[in-house]
Amino acid sequence: MNNKSLNMAEGPILPLLLQMSWPSIATVLVVNVYYLIDAFWLARLSSNALAALTISLPIQVILGGVGVGTGLGAGSYAARMFGAEENRKARQTAGQVFFLSAVLGALFISLGMAGPDLILTYFGATTEILPLSRRYLLTLLPGVPFLFLIMMASNLFRAEGRPHLVMYCALMTSAVSGILDPMLIFGWGPFPRLGIEGAAMAAVISQISGAALAFYFLRQKSSKYQLKWHYLRPDYRIILSIYSTGFPSMIINLVLSLGMLLHNHVLGGYSNLAVATLGIVSRMSGLVMIPLYGIGHGLMPMVAFSEGANLPVRLMEAVAIAVKISFAIAMVCFLIVEAFAPAIATLFSDDMELRRLTATALRINFLILITAAPSLMWINMFIGLGQGKAAMVLLVGREILFLIPFLWLLPSWFGINGVWMAQPLANAIAFLFILYWAKRQYRMFDSLIHEKT
């Protein structure tokens, strides 16, 4: 197993970006294939089981927002410290990740167990699917601290130039869950038939496995973090630095969950099949966005390191290359989905109405790819620079000013198709604001370069 860290200070940009990105692409691919498999088995169990899983998506987005937001803050801070050669601060960041995973995990378990019905009803669960949603959520909760640790440690691995370790953790998590999923859902072999609870139990076991592997990697002698037990003591100065970037990222994801909540409520007014359609579209969207997220994940620590090492020319070149590559990939994926939407829909269900809804939703919703690619790269640039507030304003503004009004207005004009249209239209308008802010940042880089010369 190669544990050598990549050199982010020197060498050609494109090969480095690809080396930083491909493990993240593979990671997101593995995770989203698992999500698709999860949806596949639950769709075979019943459409209500798939709808119950879809209701939990905003909750998972909230958990992901907290875990990924904290991880992005930790990764950005650690990469800047490595770039500035303040290695002790970077190493202490790893210890804070363990402390924060435990504290935040305990908090969310307590909140979830205190009022599951209230939470699920708020997120759109109907009377028919509430019992299934409750069983899934309560079984899933014990894995939250381990899920947080995986998310946060993944950003630490990227920050030290070992992005391939993220892939190994994802492979472990997805493989364990993928194997256990059908066995626990349907009672294959020696396992009892647990239904939707089996899917949640498989997820918890897989999260514990992935967290154990992440801990092993951080304890390796080849790790730049050289994790020691006393690093786990809370250091509030480092935690504050983590959340100066991470908290805005958390707010972004929480607002995104609000958008999913409104999707659930609006589609719930049509039928449970409409909610199930959203579950399929969300998973396909995650699958198609894989290369974009991967390149963004690879770009962020490169930007952070270059910022810490005062290398603005290298930073701008990395962002420009990432934007061009991501846009080309997005167009290819968009054309494939537009051409094969009906065939994709047949993979998930034998229900003809669900197939029809899914094919139409895919073709409309996936227009978002055209503007999502460059927007995602620039947002990762802001996060790498430690400008989490700028990223937050741009993305939260998209959700509140455009997406939410569109979700209320467009269905009254276009019916259910208006729901699928809301996100692409909101993203297209927000793209203009993100482009303006990115160009403003480029001008600041140009001024810094002229000062140096």
Image (cartoon, rainbow, N blue to C red):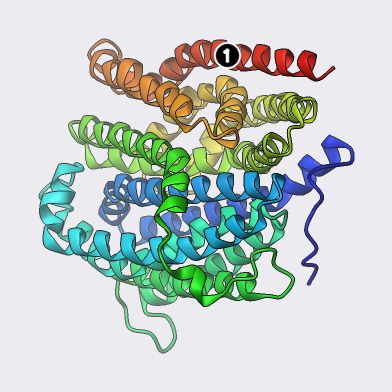
Q: Residue at x 29, y 49 (%)?
A: 59
Q: Residue at x 40, y 63 (%)?
A: 234
- Residue 347 in picture, x, y percent from top left: 51, 48
- Residue 39 in picture, x, y percent from top left: 42, 54
Q: Which residue is mark 1?
A: 435
Number of on-image labels: 1
In the rendered image, is residue 127 in sight?
yes
- Residue 447 in picture, x, y percent from top left: 71, 13
Looking at the rendered structure, the secondary structure element under dot 1 is helix
Q: Residue furthest right?
A: 11
- Residue 206 in picture, x, y percent from top left: 47, 71
The reply, left or right, for residue 156 in relation to residue 148 is right
Toward which corner of the image does residue 191 lie, by quadrant?
A: bottom left
Quadrant location, the C terminus: top right
Q: Residue at x 26, y 59 (%)?
A: 108
Vertical relation: 6 (above or below) 451:
below
In the rendered image, is residue 30 in sight?
no
Q: Residue at x 29, y 40 (%)?
A: 275
Which amino acid lies under the numbered mark 1 shown in the image of this protein? Answer: Leu
State the residue in front, 353 or 218.
218
State the residue in front, 319 or 245.
245
Please rate how many residues cluster around mark 1, counting C-alpha atoms within 10 Å: few if below 14, some from 14 to 19, many from 20. Answer: some
State the residue in front, 107 or 445.
445
The reply, left or right, for residue 305 in relation to residue 287 is right
